[in-house]
Image (tube, helix red, strand yellow):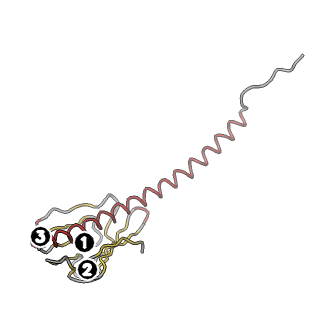
Amino acid sequence: MNAPSQKGISLLELLIALAVLGILLGVGLVSLSAYRQSLVIREAATQVATELQSIRQQARRQSLNFSFQAVEGGNTYKAGRTAELASLPSRSLPPGVVFQRVPAGGGGVTFLAPYGVVDAANRTFTLRGPGNRVLNVHVVGSTGKVVVRAP
């Protein structure tokens, strides 16, 4: 007589497979959370850099002064014509991101007409996001070139 063959998996094999799967999922969720935090701060830095580049171009095109202003510890900013800046609505950064540090002298930068040069060289906006991740948005030199860097 032939012994009956066993088909399927044992309870022990199933428990081992579930344990390995649980460990892999745990590691994946931690990595996903860190990646998401990184994306949020990068999105905010890109938003600020794009806004600065945009108002620089508008200052050149329209031959008017344009300004960007933020408040330290806040998560909003204003950008637009310098003469109308006080009456413009504030724009928000992504949730969880704040301006950790802004340039001295009002927390802003002004691009002067007609060439879009900066009123004061080398301004830096420091953004802090979820997980205390930090990125700097630099307005370099008097030409107003905008660069995003890690501190």
| Residue under label 1 | 71
Please state if 9 lies on the left or on the right of 92 as rendered: right
Q: Residue at x 35, y 60 (%)?
A: 43
Residue at image location 9% in from the left, 72% down from the top? 83
Mark 1 vs mark 2, CA separation in Å = 23 Å
- Read off the residue under disc 3: 62
> Is residue 78 shown above or below 34?
below
Task: Evaluate if marks 1 and 2 touch, with contact meaning CB atoms under 8 Å apart.
Answer: no
Mark 1 closeness class: few <14, some 14–19, many ≥20 residues within 10 Å: some
Count how many numbered circles sit on residues in the image.
3
User: Mark 2 falls on what kind of element?
Assistant: loop
Whether tag 3 and tag 1 are in contact, CB under 8 A, the answer is no
x then y, percent, for residue 44: 33, 62
Tell me what residue is drawn at x 43 percent, y 61 percent: 38
The N terminus sits in image quarter: top right
Q: Tell whether label 2 touches label 3 (CB within 8 Å).
A: no
Q: Is residue 31 above or below residue 1?
A: below
Q: Amino acid at mark 1?
A: Val
Q: Closer to the camera, 29 or 113?
A: 113
Give the Cα separation between the discs numbered 3 and 2: 17 Å
Image x and y of residue 60, in percent:
16, 73
In the image, 16 versus 143, the foreground residue is 143
Disc 1 or disc 2, which is closer to the eye?
Answer: 2
Q: Callout 3, which amino acid?
A: Gln
Question: Type of residue at label 2?
Answer: Thr
In this view, which residue lies farthest toward the top? 1
- Say which label, 1 or 2, has the lower sequence index: 1
The residue pinned by badge 2 equals 143
Q: CA distance from mark 3 to mark 1?
A: 27 Å
